[in-house]
Amino acid sequence: MEQVPLSANLEAIFRSRLVPVQVVDAKGKVIGTFVPRLTEDDVSPDAVVSEPPLFIDQCGQRRVSIRIAGNTNYPCLMAALAKGYRVCLEYTKLDKPVLHWEEFMPDYQAEQDGAYFSATSAEELLGLIAMQEVRGDKWRGWTADERTAAKRIHDTAQTFDTDGNLLPNE
């Protein structure tokens, strides 16, 4: 069975392969298997795949695995609506876009009971909503433990090339 690093673009892998692949960590240890739920007809840019691929860990347990992609926008909008937020989308026309396909910048907005959120993607919008729901009005504050945890996350971050190979720390 083919092995791919955890850092790989798994969405692209499943759009190009119809067979399971093992997922390995940075040290090459197998941490699970992705099982695509696609058919030959599903492998097209316009395909709507109703069932996502499965991630099965080494204990045989099914796990959730979601990465921001073209198929996460609408579910995030629907989740914000289901939470009771009023959601709208506006665009700002950019005078000097950096990339030719980014002539308009999206502004997703959600409001509920005086709480207002704004982001450039539906996924970011839902993330802000979740952050405020978990952290409350003191979302900006950091405890000493939170600073330590954030530092650990950043200090242990690894860098991979586009083929998924671990790059040495510089």
Image (tube, rainbow, N blue to C red):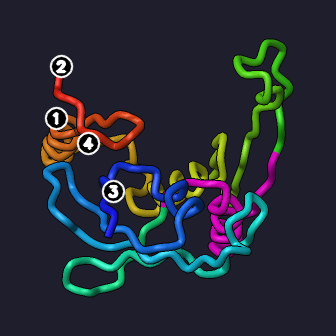
Q: Are marks 3 and 4 in contact (CB under 8 Å)?
A: no
Q: Residue at x 66, y 62 (%)?
A: 71
Q: Nearer the viewer, residue 38 or 127?
A: 38
What crowding class fits label 3: few (fewer than 14 Cα within 10 Å), some (14-19), or many (20 or more)?
A: many
Instruction: Give whichever of discs 1 and 4 has the lower sequence position.
Output: 4
Mark with earlier residue (1, 2): 1
- The numbered disc on residue 155 is 1
Q: Which residue is mark 2?
A: 170
Magenta stretch? 67-89
Q: Is residue 90 above or below residue 29?
A: above
Q: Residue 140, percent across and down?
A: 38, 41
Gap in angstroms between the C-alphas marked 3 and 1 = 24 Å
Residue 69 highlighted magenta (yes or no): yes
Q: Amino acid at mark 2?
A: Glu
Sequence-earlier tag: 4 or 2: 4
Q: CA distance from mark 3 to mark 4?
A: 36 Å
Q: Is residue 91 left or right of residue 67?
A: right
Report the disc number at residue 142. 4
Label 1 residue SS: helix
Quickly name the residue at label 3.
4
Query: Which tag is nearer the camera, tag 1 or tag 4?
Result: 1
Q: Residues within 10 Å of mark 2 (few under 14, many from 20)?
A: few
- Which residue of the protein is positioned furthest toward the bottom in this rendering? 60
Residue at the limit of the structure toward the top, as seen here? 96
Pointer 3 and pointer 1: residues touching (CB < 8 Å)?
A: no
Q: Distance between the Cα atoms at labels 4 and 2? A: 29 Å
**The N terminus sits in image quarter:** bottom left
Q: Between disc 3 and disc 4, whose residue precedes? A: 3
Residue 93 pos. (x, y %):
86, 26
